[in-house]
Image: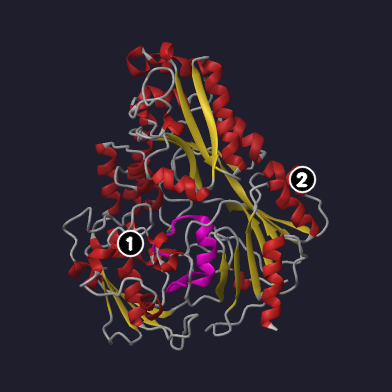
């Protein structure tokens, strides 16, 4: 029976045109998966699969981001000094390979990430918590194997069910950090048998900073999740219910994740019942093309504020060598931009006054959203609604551009490429608005718009090749630090990629990490937001009220913004 079922799913994968069966769930989205290795993945497309085939020690309780339920652990305790976290693991859990789970798997999973910590992966915040640095051993020679080996230990032996995490300093967000997919528990025996790091001191140096997309776990999975990977062809993904799952068996037996960049194709598939859920970018599309379709439900709630924060990113030291597609000549000669183009605050200010967030909010979200004053969702501690917002003002934009680069920019002009990930119509619309507004200012200003497939976008961004790009941030853990440090600190994920540095802001953010006093943290974040308004390191765009579009017969849908898919596959039925 299983062979016949998977045969039909494989047919659906190849044709994309079969009616979805009662035991099969089809999700159509855009943005290809980057990798299925939890120690490398750092995007929501990958996370959609990872959070269903792997598991962490605890999980979010339904739609709550503040309540948690045991998953691979059944209990935990925190020492009085806040430096030791001890978890009791669940008995009888097996991986998809059939291997039993024990402490050695948890230890290996976390320590493997600390060893590799490749640039662009999400391991940095686990490394900060457990090693006191976000770097790997190639970039920080203070890191030793003893530090990594001591970060996670098995007090009752490798095959025991007790695991201990040892922190060098208090981290009030550590518990929720362990619920991100980079803390997924992987099958150590299976991983080592298939050529991954063997978990020993003798070989750890060989794996430091390695791009794991070149290794076995990039496209193979042995997790503990309710679903096991059947196939990932680089674009589409097939998974099936794991019959050895420790928890309740899911009602949905087969899952197909298809990447379909054309939104109209996704909508037609939903209408015809070939897709059970689709990714839809804007409220405008919902109201104009989806609401009222027979057999389709729009799940919505005014309280569903998206926790994603998107922004126009301006790289202050872009790579110019062999990068003509993005920076043209690489010089200030009217046919390109120099490496430090956005290091000039007047250039950044000119772009800020060329974007119209109010127009964007009305046009794409029909007013169902918020114009952000800073790179933090309004529901989080530290958000300051009173920080000013840059709005479309062509006169001020012209003044800023005339003052930029010692007054040379206005007469000389520039040509630059603005990039977004293909299929994201929201970001595409931002690029079109900005292009029009910038080019209307001066015929010597040329903005080329380029859509890039998601893995290529990530690779170019990590290589420092994108001078101007649109990208968002979905939270890793439910704490304002995950946004504020990421965006504004010179060592943060985006701050570092944008080569942005403000010593005063860095110091304030470090102070916010060192205290658990919520009043103090709020004041520190408010101050950072005010300073950043003057600096304009990037331009946030409005966030929207969230919604989910699915067939009406999909039951169990809920909205948890900390999950890449907003709900787990195992909790739905048809």
Picture quarter containing residue 330?
top left
Which residue lies at the image location 61% right of the left edge and 82% below the top edge? 249
Residue 3 vs residue 246, the one in the foreground: 3
Asked if residue 307 lies left or right of residue 241, the reply is left
Tell me: residue 30, above or below residue 195.
above
Q: How far across and how far down the image is residue 417, in percent?
A: 48, 31
What is the spatial separation of the Cα atoms under label 2 and label 1, in whole angstroms?
A: 43 Å
341 horizontally vs 150: left or right: right
Task: Please give the range of residues in magenta.
Answer: 38-61
The residue that disc 2 covers is 289
* Residue at image point 59% right, 82% down: 248
Q: Quadrant of the N terminus?
A: bottom right
The structure residue drawn at horizontal position 78% and vertical position 61%, both measured from the top left corner, is 273
Please tell me whether residue 55 belongs to the stretch shown in magenta.
yes
Residue 164 tag number: none
Secondary structure beneath dot 2 equals: helix
Q: Is residue 538 visible?
A: yes
In x, y percent, where is residue 372? 50, 39
Tag 1, which secondary structure? helix
In which image quadrant can residue 22 be found? bottom right
Q: Nearer the viewer, residue 546 or 427?
A: 427
Residue 146 lies in quadrant: bottom left
Circle 1 crowding by C-alpha within 10 Å: few under 14, some 14–19, many from 20:
many
Residue highlighted by disc 1? 126
Asked if the magenta segment contains residue 360, the reply would be no
Q: From the top left corner, tell me how far across and down residue 427 is, in percent.
A: 56, 39
Q: Position of residue 229 (x, y in %)?
A: 55, 72
């Amino acid at each position: 029976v299983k062979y016949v079922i998977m045969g039909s799913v494989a047919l659906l994968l190849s044709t994309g045109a079969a009616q979805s069966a009662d035991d099969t769930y089809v999700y159509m989205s855009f943005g290809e998966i980057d990798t299925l290795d939890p120690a490398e993945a750092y995007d929501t497309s990958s996370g959609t699969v990872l959070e269903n085939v792997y598991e962490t020690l605890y999980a979010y309780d339904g739609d709550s981001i503040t309540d948690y339920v045991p998953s691979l652990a059944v209990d935990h305790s925190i020492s009085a000094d806040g430096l030791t976290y001890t978890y009791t693991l669940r008995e009888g859990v097996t991986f998809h390979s059939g291997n039993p789970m024990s402490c050695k798997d948890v230890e290996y999973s976390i320590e493997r990430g600390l060893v590799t910590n490749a640039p662009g992966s999400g391991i940095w915040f686990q490394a900060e918590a457990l090693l006191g640095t976000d770097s790997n051993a190639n970039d920080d020679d203070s890191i030793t194997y003893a530090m990594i080996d001591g970060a996670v230990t098995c007090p009752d032996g490798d095959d025991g069910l007790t695991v201990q995490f040892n922190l060098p300093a208090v981290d009030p967000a550590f518990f929720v950090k362990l619920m991100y997919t980079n803390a997924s528990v992987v099958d150590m025996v299976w991983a080592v048998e298939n050529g991954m790091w063997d978990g020993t001191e003798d070989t750890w140096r060989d794996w430091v900073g390695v791009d794991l997309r070149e290794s076995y776990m990039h496209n193979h999975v042995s997790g503990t999740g309710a679903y096991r990977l059947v196939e990932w062809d680089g674009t589409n993904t097939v998974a099936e219910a794991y019959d050895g799952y420790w928890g309740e068996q899911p009602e949905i037996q087969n899952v197909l994740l298809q990447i379909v960049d054309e939104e109209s194709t996704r909508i037609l598939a939903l209408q015809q019942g070939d897709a059970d859920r689709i990714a839809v970018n804007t409220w405008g599309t919902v109201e104009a093309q989806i609401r009222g379709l027979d057999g389709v439900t729009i799940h919505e709630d005014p309280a569903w504020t998206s926790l994603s924060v998107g922004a126009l990113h301006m790289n202050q030291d872009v790579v110019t060598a062999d990068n003509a597609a993005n920076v043209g000549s690489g010089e200030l000669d009217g046919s390109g931009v120099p490496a430090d183009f956005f290091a000039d605050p007047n250039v950044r200010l000119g772009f800020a006054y060329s974007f119209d967030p109010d127009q964007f909010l009305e046009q794409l979200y029909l007013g169902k959203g918020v114009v952000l004053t800073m790179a933090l969702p309004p529901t989080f501690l530290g958000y300051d609604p009173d920080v000013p917002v840059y709005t479309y003002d062509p006169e001020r934009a012209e003044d800023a551009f005339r003052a930029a680069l010692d007054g040379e920019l206005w007469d000389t002009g520039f040509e630059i490429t603005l990039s977004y990930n293909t299929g994201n119509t929201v970001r595409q619309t931002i690029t079109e608005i900005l292009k029009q507004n910038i080019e209307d200012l001066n015929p010597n200003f040329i903005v080329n718009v380029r859509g890039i497939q998601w893995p290529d976008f990530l690779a170019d961004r990590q290589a420092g090749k994108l001078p101007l790009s649109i990208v968002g941030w979905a939270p890793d853990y439910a704490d304002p630090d995950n946004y504020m440090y990421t965006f504004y600190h010179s060592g943060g994920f985006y701050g570092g990629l944008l080569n942005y540095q403000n010593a005063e802001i860095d110091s304030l953010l470090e102070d916010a990490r060192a205290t658990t006093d919520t009043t103090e943290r709020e004041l520190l974040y408010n101050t950072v937001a005010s300073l950043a308004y003057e600096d304009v390191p990037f331009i946030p765009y409005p966030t929207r009220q969230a919604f989910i579009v699915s067939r009406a017969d999909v039951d169990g849908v809920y909205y948890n913004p900390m999950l890449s898919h907003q709900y787990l596959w195992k909790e739905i039925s048809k």
